[in-house]
Structure formats: C-alpha cells, structure tokens
Amino acid sequence: MKHNKENLYDLIYQIVDQIPKGKVTTYGAIANSLGIKSGARMVGYAMNASHSMSGLPAHRVVNRNGVLTGKHHFDDPDEMQKRLELDGIAVQDDQIVDFKKRFWDPCHIGDM
DNA sequence: CCAGTGACGGAAT
DNA sequence: TATTCCGCCACTG
C-alpha cells in the first residue's frame, strides 16, 4: 500500500488525458483540481513519468505563463510545439498565442 | 537519514 | 510592471 502514491500520478494523467484538442491547461490548474495547493511542482514531476504514457498530451500542459517549459523534456523538443500547432494552437517564441483563450479548466471533469 | 533538485506558483522587493 | 526569492512535496544521490 505504500505505492498508493501512484494514485496521485494517475489522477494527473487522467486530467491531462481529458484535455480537449485545441486547448491547454496549466500545472497549477491540474493541481488545484486534484485538491493539492502549490502542488504544481508535483504535477510537473508526474509528467516526467508521462514518457511511459503513450497518447498522453503532455504538450498541452504548460506553466501559468503559457510557456512551453517542458518542451525540453520531450524526446524531441520541437515535437511539443509541432503537436500544439497540429492541434490548432499557435506557438511563438516557445509561448502559446492567446494562451488565455486556449486555457482549459480541468475542473470541468469533476462536474461530469 | 540528510541534502539537493525540479515540466511551478505566488508573494515580496 | 518586472525581477527575485521562497515555499511545497516528491524523488534521487
């Protein structure tokens, strides 16, 4: 039962997996939805394990500034921006254009 | 067991 | 308004 900690990571994966195409969210928003405050770091840390999660749109997760802070952690850093553009999200200077409009609130899941 | 680090966020200066 | 420092929680060395 000491491995229950994985539950926290699983929750994060579930939320990220529910991010609609053409939208993005922030680590803090995900952490907030999980009920953990200031847990944005934990969310980002969990994303590091996302390498094992195929189909996990981690590229849709950015920091609160809308900057692709984690693009450098992908197999190919350029792939993150490429995927965002494929989703219809414009990225300039490693930053999401109209990030505010592209922002998606994960809280929408709990209301399901 | 202790110390350092990290895909962040917010408060302070 | 912008830049800097600190804090939170988990993992590695």
Image (tube, coloured by chain):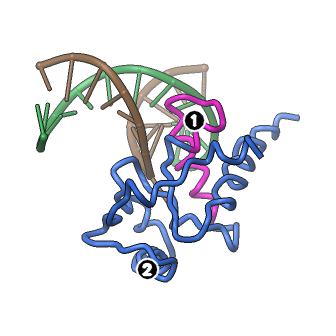
Chain colours: A blue, B brown, C green
- Magenta residues span A30-50
Question: Looking at the image, is C3 positioned above or below residue A10?
Answer: above
Q: Is residue C13 left or right of residue A11?
A: left
Q: Is residue A75 left or right of residue B9?
A: right
**Residue A110 place in picture, x, y as percent:** 73, 41
Which element is circle 1 on? helix
Q: Residue at x 63, y 42 (%)?
A: A107
Cα gap from disc 2 to disc 1, whole angstroms: 27 Å
Q: Residue at x 82, y 38 (%)?
A: A4
In magenta stretch: residue A99: no
Badge 1 amino acid:
Asn
Question: Looking at the image, is A77 positioned above or below residue A37?
Answer: below
Nearer to us in this view, A32 or A110: A110
Q: Residue at x 49, y 79 (%)?
A: A83
Q: Residue at x 63, y 62 (%)?
A: A50
**Residue A95 place in picture, x, y as percent:** 31, 64
The quarter of the rendered structure image containing the N terminus of chain A is: top right
Which element is circle 2 on? helix
For residue A85, the mark is 2
Chain of the residue displaying label 2: A
